[in-house]
Amino acid sequence: HNLAGSEHLWPSGRIVARQLVVLWPRFGFRLLAPHLRRLLTAAEGLSKASMDAAREFRRDLRTLGWLLHHSYELRQHARPLCAELAIRAARMNHRPETLAATVGIAANSGALDDRGAL
């Protein structure tokens, strides 16, 4: 699957991401960050509830990754959160697909670059 979709979706992705840049202090730090942290904590383990939480966590990360792919402006704001999630996932006992999603989102945010947060 291609997270970028088609070329027809690029302008709409950039518009949504630019609007999120303005709202990032409220949306990113007060709503999205606690939600993703809660899901990451709940996703640890092998129970049915943890597998459901892991699936929802990966879905939310794919959505955020799509926005980061389309908006360079949002990357610098989301970089600390994405780096934190990657570090937390690496330290916890998660399934490989969940760990891969967190590393992918960290890469999309630029946290794995030479000057990145990691």
Image (cartoon, rainbow, N blue to C red):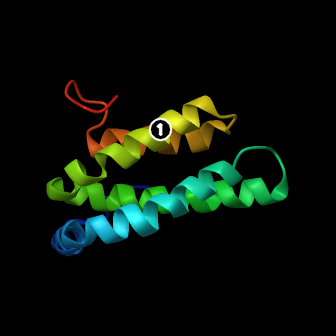
Question: Residue drawn 18% across and 71% down?
Answer: 22
Residue 66 percent location from the top left of the image: 34, 60
Q: Is residue 74 above or below residue 108?
A: below
Q: Is residue 3 visible?
A: no
- The residue beneath circle 1 is 86
The amino acid type found where label 1 is placed reads: Ala
Q: Quadrant of residue 56?
A: bottom right
Please name whichever residue, 62 or 20, is drawn nearer the observer in this view of the structure: 20
**Relative side of 117 to 47, left or right:** left
Taking the image as drawn, is residue 23 in sight?
yes
Is the C terminus in the top left, top right, bottom left or bottom right quadrant? top left
Residue placed most toward the observer, 95 or 93? 93
Q: Position of residue 113 (x, y in %)?
A: 24, 29
Q: Quadrant of the N terminus?
A: bottom left
Q: Residue at x 25, y 32 (%)?
A: 116
Residue at the spot 45% in from the left edge and 58% down from the top edge: 33
Q: Residue at x 46, y 56 (%)?
A: 61
